[in-house]
Amino acid sequence: MSRAGRISIAALLALGIAFPFLVDGYTVYSMTRLLALAIAIAGVNLLTGVAGLFSIGQSAFFALGAYAIGMSGEQLGLNPYLALPVAALSGGLLGFAFGWPAARLGAVHLALLTWGLAVSMPRLLKSSIFDTWTGGVQGIYLDRPLPPDWTRLTEDQWWWFITMGVLILTFWLLHNLVRGRIGRAWRAIKDQPLAAHSMGIHLSYYRAMAFAISGAVTAVSGAIIGVLDDYVAPDAYSVFFSITLLVAAVAGGIDSLRGALIGAVVLALLGAVSATLSEWIAFPIYGFVLIALIIVAPRGVAPLLDRMADRLSGRHADPNQNQRRSFR
């Protein structure tokens, strides 16, 4: 990493540490939700931007994580800190089990299958068969644990630091994973699946692994937001939520970790604007924004900022530069 990159990361960390002490509690809570959504968007970026697998079923993994942490606390008595790995494991197992047969499908059939997963999950959570565990249509109320006394932090400040730590750990793991052998296999499958298969890369296994890791990451995000909201309900995880995650991923940069953060900001801004408008016009806003971004910045905001920085610094555009910038 360049010296400027290290300085930028250090500055962002310092800003992140100071932030919850500079603003009011509601702002800290809102920005904590934004960080948690960035984790889910990073899962979309990994699955679609790196592995080349189109999915509109991420809301199912998000819901699974939220309910996993809720049921772990209500049924098993686990505190949310111990339940976070349970949520990640649940999302990973569902992702692999779903991705193994789905990996053999073409793009159109895969999109339909993931749409079916997103539609089925809320109905399954409301089913009377599982209402003892899921609470049915009423959902589950969660008890957010208070910060330790020795920290002298408020509840919102404590969960800001917890979420920021999970975000940093997730981004670091994904960055190193994509830069390694598994990431190279994903990119080969995305660009030239026949050539990748002829080189001995097991297409179904690596695609299923992409679904598993993306599902685990998205489930962790759902678990954190479930704790922040103190409540999980099935109707909050519809297909529309999957579409909003996809819009945010495309807006920020579908193959960039920085794009996940930018996409979360775009998602928050769209939510704020939609809240001031009538319901019938709120949904088309996402479509209009997506069309405008595809026209203005087809690769997303993060690559657009990279190109602007290159021009300001006097560097010449390199057509292979985006390939060398490895999921950062």
Image: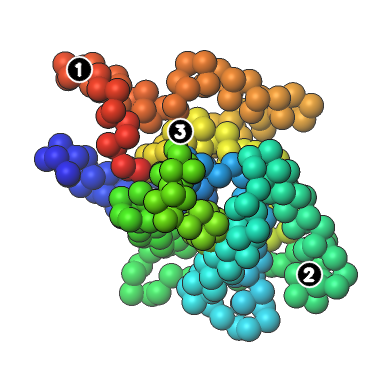
Q: Which residue is depicted at the point 56% across and 81% down?
A: 78
Image height check: is 176 above or below 9?
A: below
Q: Which amino acid does label 1 sit on?
A: His
How many angstroms separate mark 3 from mark 2 (CA)?
36 Å
Q: Which residue is depicted at the point 77% across and 63% down?
A: 125
Pointer 3 local density, CA inside 10 Å: few below 14, some 14–19, many at least 20: many
Q: Name the residue nearer the viewer: 21 or 261.
A: 261
Q: What residue type is labelled 2?
A: Gly
Q: Which amino acid does label 3 sit on?
A: Gly
Residue on which disc 1 sits: 316
Element carrying mark 2: loop
Mark sitting on residue 252: 3
Image height check: is 148 above or below 136?
A: below
* Callout 3 touching callout 2 (CB < 8 Å): no
Element carrying mark 1: loop
Q: Which residue is depicted at the point 82% across and 71% down?
A: 131
Callout in the foreground (3, 1): 1
Q: Position of residue 218 (x, y in %)?
A: 54, 55
Residue on which disc 2 sits: 135
Position of residue 296 in the picture relative to residue 244 (left or right):
left
Q: Name the residue nearer the viewer: 79 or 83.
A: 83
The earlier-in-sequence mark between 3 and 2 is 2
Q: Name the residue nearer the viewer: 123 or 204.
A: 204
Q: Position of residue 227 (x, y in %)?
A: 57, 63
